[in-house]
Amino acid sequence: MASTGKCEYCGSTVSSGDRTCPSCGAPNPNYVEDTPRTVFLPKTIEELKEYCAERGMPLLRMRFFIGEDFREPRAFGIYREGDAFVVYKNKSDGSRAIRYRGPDEAYAVNELFLKLLDECHQRGIYPDGKPERSAPSKAQIAARKRTNRNVLIFLAVVFSLILLAASFSICSHRRDGYYDFNDGRMWYRYGSGWYYTFDDTDVGGWYEGSQPASDYEDYYVGNRFDEDWGVSDFKGSDTWDQIQSDHSSSSSDYDSWDSGGTDWDSDW
């Protein structure tokens, strides 16, 4: 378990899991290389969808199509075809390069996930966390220390707000998924929103509704789509795409995303 202490240069709290002080960048002599860390790595197509949605990624603008065999030029994607998972890139001329085709979903998802992160990193966006900084010189540490107090106060306020927002987001999405209230409809809860559909005769449309019951958790049937329910997949619907689009509009990190910055002529 990680322990905490004080930075000998600026006095800020430092964890044994920090290679350098998060406040002034000084090297941490108490850094422990094998400190346990929890890192979320999506292993299924559904988990990758969730990863992107929670970070407000505008996938249409980014040209990433998760769970879809998209055929137009300039696109990365992954989809299931029978027992195989296919990871592909559609180049500028419309030709397709297959990165992976096989039965290993986790491997396939990781291939596309790494490409997604690479495209983000090239644009200065780090959904997986910024890379560690190199240790500064003693002169740089001294200079930072002289001006660091106000910065520490500001960072503490920002960090508190981020933790509050993250805590609210986690709680609000704790029971996202499909619900069956035996009312002739299938429901999906996403955050504070409720959406419903009828069987396939309704052409798979999903509509916004009101919370069906106060004890809704008793009707939870899972977050993974099951074709046996006889309805369409909520995460493959136009309603889901619109939710992602609306969510991404509040994420400034991706506002300037230009897919023209991708090398669309290479195989990957």
Image: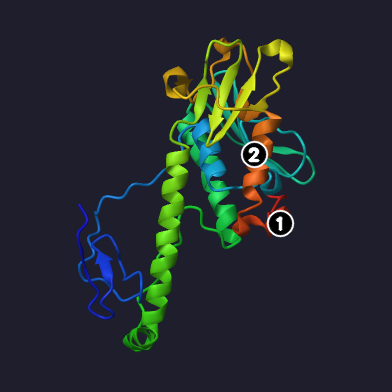
Residue ID at (45%, 31%): 175
Looking at the rendered structure, the secondary structure element under dot 1 is loop
* 130 relative to 82 in the view: left or right: left
Identify which amino acid the numbered label 1 is placed on.
Asp
* 205 relative to 31 in the view: left or right: right
Residue 228 lies, with reference to residue 35, above or below; the image says above
* 190 relative to 171 in the view: left or right: right
* Distance in Å between CA atoms under marks 1 and 2: 21 Å
Residue 96 lies, with reference to residue 116, above or below; the image says above
Q: Which mark is residue 131?
A: none
Residue ID at (41%, 77%): 151
- Residue 165: image location, x then y, percent: 46, 52
Tell me which label, 1 or 2, sits earlier in the chain: 2
Residue 99 lies, with reference to residue 7, above or below; the image says above
Looking at the rendered structure, the secondary structure element under dot 2 is helix
Query: Of discs 1 and 2, which sits in the foreground?
Result: 2
Q: Is 134 in front, or is 235?
A: 235
- Residue 188: image location, x then y, percent: 56, 25
- Residue 90: image location, x then y, percent: 71, 40
Q: Which mark is residue 258?
A: 1
Residue with the most extreme right position: 93
Quadrant housing residue 3: bottom left
Residue 201 lies, with reference to residue 220, above or below; the image says above
Disc 2: which residue: 243
Residue with the most extreme front position: 214
Residue ID at (53%, 16%): 226
Residue ID at (43%, 73%): 154
User: Is residue 59 shown to the viewer in this render?
Assistant: no
Identify which amino acid the numbered label 2 is placed on.
Ile
User: Is residue 141 shown to the viewer in this render?
Assistant: yes
